[in-house]
């Protein structure tokens, strides 16, 4: 299972990285494309807006210009009605009439707030002028070449923009015929200055041009652009301009390296005089009905910057949204992966659990078999013990019983024969045999005793003392020396005094028995402290434990003593007693001969309290 799972995760990780990079590239391209589209849309929008605003501004300027021109258009006709002018035209040499006409024209010029007013005879010669007093007076000059003069004579009204040939000042000329009856006597001309208009253009804060029908700039927001043409002028036009002296002796050169169109929506790279080429938005609007155009050269950089800003915002927004989407997608995938991992884990746990359940079941059945086997073994052991017991008991009891039988039979026979003394002896024997049988039964009873122990602190010193008293007759019998190592006072074990003494008596008696027949039998008793327990060591100097006996010492009815002297229950009983208090009993041979029995019991802590009775 794990073999399937891990490689799958590894492969999918590298694959996912590759796919992630691809997605990142696609997302970046998408954002850039979106940004580019947004830029184009915003730029187009800003340009449209700009065009609309420019159209409004151009409208305002054009209307103002048209109002200026039309305001003055009826003036020459009105001024021509004054008889002073006709009078002078009739008698041009009359000084009085000249003076009167000059005065009238001067008043008219001031009253109408125009640059100049003057009177021309049918030959084009100026008879009187508002500036008659000034050094550059028009009086005496011939303006027959001017189109306004001819137009006034032929069509009744002449309009013309041009640079003054006398003053060098540009202006808008309006001319009307002076009539008497139906006869045209001459022409009155008003020159309207356009400085105010030019100042207004200059103050607009943008590049504005006013061009005539030939595309020549005659008013401009910038002085340097005046008398330049939108496109190179055809030869015929140049010749006409020279003839009418419309722009004086001023050469008319193109405004830019290429023709500036008066139509078109897209920005155009233009290099104006003294400038490097840069993009311009061109807006135009016709002014009046003379073919004049108001041209605005706008700057698209603001629209570009604004569009760039907006497009960047769009691109960033797109990137943000894509990032957000990627984040949520990643989270969803992580959750899916985790779910998968959990699923795998659960599957594995379920499999393991099933395995364990099987193993537990196998264990349970093994345990059941073991239990059965153990029970059988216990049963077998019990039977073995029972067999040993019955063998031991029958062996122990058969002999005194047989002797009893013999002594009783003898006693009956002796009584019949009247041998009373011998009968008494036999009875004495019977009594001691009964006593021995009773002892055997007592021992068996002690072995069979099954009372719950009630342990409490027991003084080790007094237990040893009582035990020594009990084995004293036997010690004396074999003239043994019992050496007790000095005991620290107050040592106590957790047990029961009588039982501990019983164990000690058993061990001491065995030791003494083992040394029977020796010349200097010595038995040694010593106490050793162990962690949380006390060890009582009883060492004799007898023959030691035979190898074959060591494995059976603690079995009931194991004895090497001659029949009638040992029942083989002493050590078995002792072991049962010691273990009931959580203690141990072990036997070994000392290296220099003799047996060592070590009895350990839980220590009760040292106290000076009087020993337990
Ligand atoms: P019994 O004393 O009735 O034989 P025990 O259970 O007390 O029963 O002892 C069993 C046997 O262990 C003894 O018969 C003897 O063979 C052996 N034994 C016990 N103590 C000693 C000892 N100090 N030295 C040698 N053998 C011993």
Image: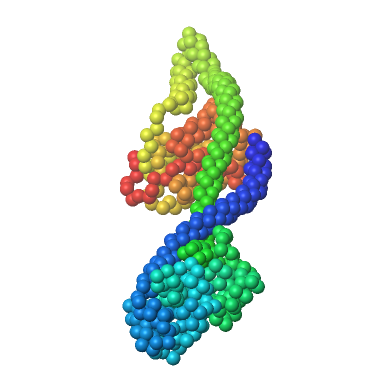
In this picture, is 129 found above or below 320?
A: below
Instruction: Examine the image and state in which quarter residue 420 appears.
Output: top left
Residue 358 appears in view: yes
Question: Percent x, y for residue 576?
Answer: 48, 32
Residue beneath the point at 44% across and 62% down: 59
> In the rendered view, does 594 fall on the left or right side of 91?
right
Query: For this rendering, which residue is in front, 561 or 30?
Result: 30
Question: Percent x, y for residue 211?
Answer: 52, 70
Question: Percent x, y for residue 26?
Answer: 62, 50
> In the rendered view, does 80 fall on the left or right side of 548?
left
Residue beneath the point at 42% across and 87% down: 93
Residue 10 appears in view: no
The quarter in which the C terminus is drawn is top left
Query: For this rendering, which residue is in front, 287 or 162?
Result: 162
In this picture, is 128 found above or below 219?
A: below
Question: Percent x, y for residue 74?
Answer: 39, 68
> In the rendered view, does 51 fall on the left or right side of 369?
left
Residue beneath the point at 39% across and 45% down: 604
The quarter in which the N terminus is drawn is top right
In this picture, is 479 found above or below 230?
A: above
* Residue lying furthest bottom: 135
Residue beneath the point at 50% across and 34% down: 575
In this picture, is 597 found above or below 261?
A: above
Query: For this rendering, which residue is in front, 15 or 303?
Result: 303
């Amino acid at each position: 299972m794990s073999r399937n799972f891990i490689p799958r995760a590894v492969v999918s990780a590298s694959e996912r990285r590759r796919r992630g990079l691809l997605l990142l590239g696609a997302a970046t391209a998408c954002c850039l494309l979106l940004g580019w589209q947004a830029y184009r849309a915003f730029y187009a929008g800003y340009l449209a807006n700009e065009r609309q605003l420019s159209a409004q501004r151009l409208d305002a300027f054009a209307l103002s210009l048209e109002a200026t021109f039309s305001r003055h258009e009826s003036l020459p006709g009105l001024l021509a009605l004054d008889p002073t002018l006709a009078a002078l035209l009739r008698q041009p040499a009359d000084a009085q009439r000249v003076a009167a006409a000059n005065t009238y024209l001067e008043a008219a010029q001031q009253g109408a707030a125009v640059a100049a007013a003057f009177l021309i005879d049918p030959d084009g010669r100026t008879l009187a002028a508002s500036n008659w007093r000034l050094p550059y007076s028009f009086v005496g000059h011939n303006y027959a070449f001017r189109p306004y003069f001819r137009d006034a004579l032929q069509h009744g009204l002449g309009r013309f923009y041009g640079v003054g040939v006398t003053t060098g000042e540009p202006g808008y000329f309006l001319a009307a015929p002076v009539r008497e009856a139906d006869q045209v006597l001459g022409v009155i001309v008003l020159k309207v200055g356009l400085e105010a208009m030019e100042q207004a253009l200059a103050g607009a804060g943008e590049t504005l041009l006013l061009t005539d029908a030939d595309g020549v700039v005659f008013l401009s927001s910038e002085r340097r652009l005046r008398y330049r043409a939108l496109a190179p002028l055809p030869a015929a036009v140049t010749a006409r301009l020279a003839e009418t002296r419309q722009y004086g002796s001023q050469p008319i050169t193109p405004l830019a390296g290429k023709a500036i169109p008066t139509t078109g929506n897209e920005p155009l790279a233009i290099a104006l005089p003294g400038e490097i080429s840069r993009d311009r938005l061109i807006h135009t609007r016709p002014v009046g009905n003379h073919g004049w155009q108001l041209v605005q050269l706008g700057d698209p950089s603001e629209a570009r910057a604004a569009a760039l800003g907006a497009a960047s915002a769009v691109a960033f927004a797109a990137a943000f949204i894509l990032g957000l989407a990627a984040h949520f997608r990643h989270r969803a995938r992580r959750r899916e992966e985790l779910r998968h991992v959990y699923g795998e884990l659960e599957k594995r746990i379920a499999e393991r659990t099933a395995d364990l359940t099987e193993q537990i079941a196998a264990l349970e059945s093994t345990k059941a078999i073991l239990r059965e086997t153990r029970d059988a073994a216990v049963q077998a052991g019990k039977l073995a013990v029972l067999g040993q017991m019955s063998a031991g008991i029958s062996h122990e009891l058969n002999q005194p019983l047989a002797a009893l039988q013999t002594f009783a039979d003898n006693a009956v026979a002796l009584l019949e024969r009247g041998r009373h003394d011998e009968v008494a002896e036999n009875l004495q024997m019977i009594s001691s045999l009964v006593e021995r049988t009773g002892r055997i039964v007592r021992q068996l009873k002690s072995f069979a005793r099954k009372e719950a122990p009630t342990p409490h602190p027991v003084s080790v010193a007094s237990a040893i003392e009582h035990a020594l008293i009990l084995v004293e007759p036997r010690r004396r019998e074999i003239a043994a020396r019992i050496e007790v190592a000095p005991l620290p006072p107050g040592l106590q074990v957790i047990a029961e005094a009588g039982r501990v003494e019983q164990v000690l008596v058993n061990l001491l008696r065995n030791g003494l028995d083992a040394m029977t027949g020796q010349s200097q039998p010595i038995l040694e008793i010593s106490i050793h402290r162990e962690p949380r327990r006390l060890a009582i060591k009883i060492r004799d100097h007898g023959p030691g434990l035979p190898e074959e006996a060591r494995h059976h010492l603690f079995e009931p009815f194991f004895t090497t003593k001659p029949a009638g002297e040992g029942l083989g229950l002493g050590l078995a009983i002792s072991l049962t007693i010691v273990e009931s208090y959580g203690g141990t009993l072990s036997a070994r041979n000392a290296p220099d001969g003799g047996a060592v029995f070590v009895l350990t019991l839980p220590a009760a802590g040292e106290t000076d309290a009087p020993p337990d009775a």
